[in-house]
Amino acid sequence: MNYPIDHGASLTFFPVLQNTESAFLAERFSVYLKIGVPFAYSYSYSIKKKGQLLLSLTGNNSLSNEFYLHDILLEDLSDNPTFNLTISSLDSSLIYANQLSTTVRIKPRHLVEQLEKIHTKKVSNFSISVFDHYPKKEPVSSIPVFSTKPLASSISTSKKHQQDFIASFSHVVDLHIENLLTDWKGLSNFEILQIQLSHFEKMVERTIRNQHPTLVVIHGIGEGKLKNEIHQLLRQYKEVFSFDNQYHPRFGQGATTIQFQY
């Protein structure tokens, strides 16, 4: 079945039911990926629970459709797993971004509500949105990035206040250590990571406090340690609606875009 162009993607869960005289049981669910993008793509899909990889799948597809991925046990589904999906365009000449990576999870309360609907209202499945629209490539200047170096000497505020002032308008946080500290070369990798994560948490909390809808965090690529730590922290904020590490013409895959809901 084909879907409208740029329809987005969602995961649909069909219960594998067992009816007994005394109880309604759904011990596992069949999971389908519904996707609609206007190009041939490859996908990488995985599930993690408590940091442990439960499943990993990859494949190619030339059509927008809905197809079976796997079955998942109810006990795993109830343990707040994360579903990770990366879609990559097989034609880099298109106007669409080369890649989109997203991470979603089912909150326990939402799962209970959906199971209750299946039980009482006899609905056949429930779905969660992975992304609404596959993004197009953006011009390099679409996201303003301001240097966090000191402003002109005529400004008497401290460097910290200058950084806060600039970041409050850009909604872009650069976590490269040279942008956070002037004297950092004697620090260990662990110390640098802790400083970066501390700054990141402050920026997230300030974004939430001011109820800004988005925040872009530049973490670089490297070995992925900082990015992974950031993604783990984001899963702890109830205000975070979604986050992705999609390709950007300026940052490549060195930045994560966070969407908030209030």
Image (cartoon, rainbow, N blue to C red):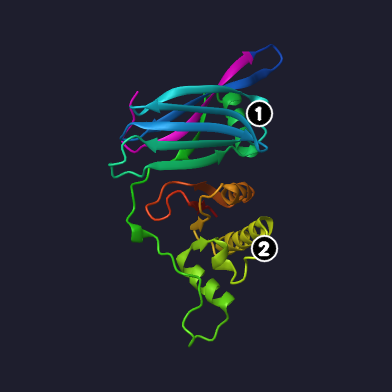
Amino acid type at image mark 2: Leu
Amino acid type at image mark 1: Asp
Q: How far across and down, in percent of the image, does residue 223 sit?
A: 56, 47
Is 235 drawn above or below residue 139 in the view shown?
Answer: above
For the point 68% across and 27% down, which residue is it? 75
For the point 44% across and 32% down, which residue is it? 43
Q: Is residue 54 visible?
A: yes
The label number, if any, that marks residue 187 in the structure image = 2
Quadrant (top left, top right, bottom left, bottom right) of the C terminus: bottom right
Location of mark 1 (residue): 76
Q: Which residues are magenta?
A: 1-18
Q: Is residue 124 visible?
A: no
Please identify, in this view, whether the residue under mark 1 or under mark 2 is nearer the observer: 2
The front one of 78 and 84 is: 84
Q: How far across and down, in percent of the image, does residue 241 sit?
A: 53, 48
The quarter of the picture where residue 190 lies is bottom right
What crowding class fits label 2: few (fewer than 14 Cα within 10 Å), some (14-19), or many (20 or more)? few
Secondary element type, mark 1:
helix
For the point 53% across and 52% down, which residue is it? 261
Residue 12 belongs to the span the image colors magenta? yes
Q: How far across and down, in percent of the image, does residue 260 sit?
A: 52, 53
The quarter of the picture where residue 50 lies is top right
